[in-house]
């Protein structure tokens, strides 16, 4: 769905006050999934920033002890350092301001009258350069507000956000064509952002 009007994205003010944009994006990559390591090319792709700028951030963060570095074959892998004194604080900050799920949640708050359930499809570690996929459930008011909200999230994340808005009618039509449609959708690894599975069966009409 294309957005005709894109409002200026809301600022993640605390993160903006503390870190420049490239560092925010690098921290979001490493601390949004602190349990795994990333080689440099992955971080560059996922941070959507210049190679030199990301390399400098990784070097500075590793030198400060915020990241650990180890080699796998010929490649350096970077990972959030769970033993760093600021690990908990940075994890909380990323989750509250720069993390994918929180950015989507904050953007959806402005269309809470149209979306009563939503989840982000969990991605495999090797697929995190792909767009963020969001499934929304609610009503289609035809005013473009949902598209604007998702575009705002994409602007903040510097990453494409792909979404589908399912209404009561569209779910019913899909179920009529394929009775296992909803079952398969709910089997997808996911993180609920708004509501829960129960909300799918109690949608506004």
Image: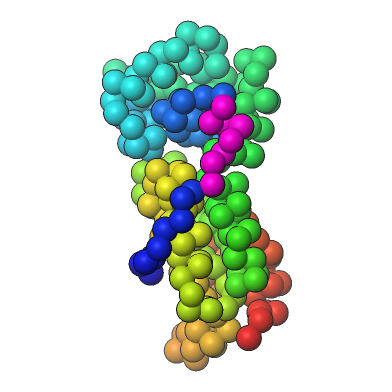
Up-down relation of residue 134 to residue 77 (above or below): below
Q: Main secondary structure of the magenta part?
A: helix
Residue farthest along the bottom direction in this orientation: 176
Above or below, comparing residue 38 to residue 197 in the picture: above
Q: Give 146 or 175, whichever is nearer the viewer.
A: 146
Residue 140 rendering spot, x and y as whole percentages: 52, 78
The residue under the point 68% across, 65% down is 196
Q: Residue at x 64, y 66 (%)?
A: 112
| Magenta residue check for 101 | no
Looking at the figure, which quarter contains the N terminus?
bottom left
Q: Is residue 158 above or below residue 114?
A: above
Colouring method of the image? rainbow
| Residue 139 % position (x, y) | 57, 78
Occupied quadrant, residue 137: bottom right
Residue in view at x 46 percent, y 56 percent? 7
Extent of the magenta region: 10-17
Q: Quadrant of the C terminus?
A: bottom right
In the foreground, 107 or 58: 107
Above or below residue 27? Residue 3 is below
Q: In the depicted view, which residue is nearer to us: 125 or 117? A: 117
- Image coords of residue 53 (percent x, y): 33, 22
Residue 30 in view here? no
Image point (54%, 47%), residue name: 10
Rendering quarter of residue 47: top left
């Amino acid at each position: 769905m294309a957005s005709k009007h894109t409002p200026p994205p809301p600022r993640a003010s605390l993160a903006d006050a503390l870190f420049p944009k490239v560092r925010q994006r690098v921290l979001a990559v490493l601390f949004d999934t602190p349990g795994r390591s990333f080689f440099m090319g992955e971080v560059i792709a996922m941070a959507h920033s210049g190679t030199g700028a990301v390399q400098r951030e990784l070097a500075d963060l590793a030198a400060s002890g915020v990241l650990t570095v180890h080699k796998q074959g010929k490649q350096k892998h970077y990972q959030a350092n769970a033993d760093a004194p600021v690990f908990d604080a940075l994890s909380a900050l990323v989750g509250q301001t720069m993390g994918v799920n929180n950015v989507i949640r904050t953007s959806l708050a402005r269309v809470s009258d149209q979306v009563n359930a939503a989840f982000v499809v969990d991605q495999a570690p090797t697929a995190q350069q792909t767009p963020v996929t969001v499934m929304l459930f609610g009503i289609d008011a035809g005013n473009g507000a949902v598209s604007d909200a998702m575009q705002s999230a994409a602007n903040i994340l510097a990453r494409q956000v792909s979404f589908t808005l399912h209404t009561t009618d569209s779910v019913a039509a899909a179920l009529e064509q394929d009775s296992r449609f909803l079952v398969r959708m709910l089997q997808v690894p996911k993180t609920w952002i708004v509501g829960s599975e129960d909300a799918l069966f109690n949608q506004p009409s």
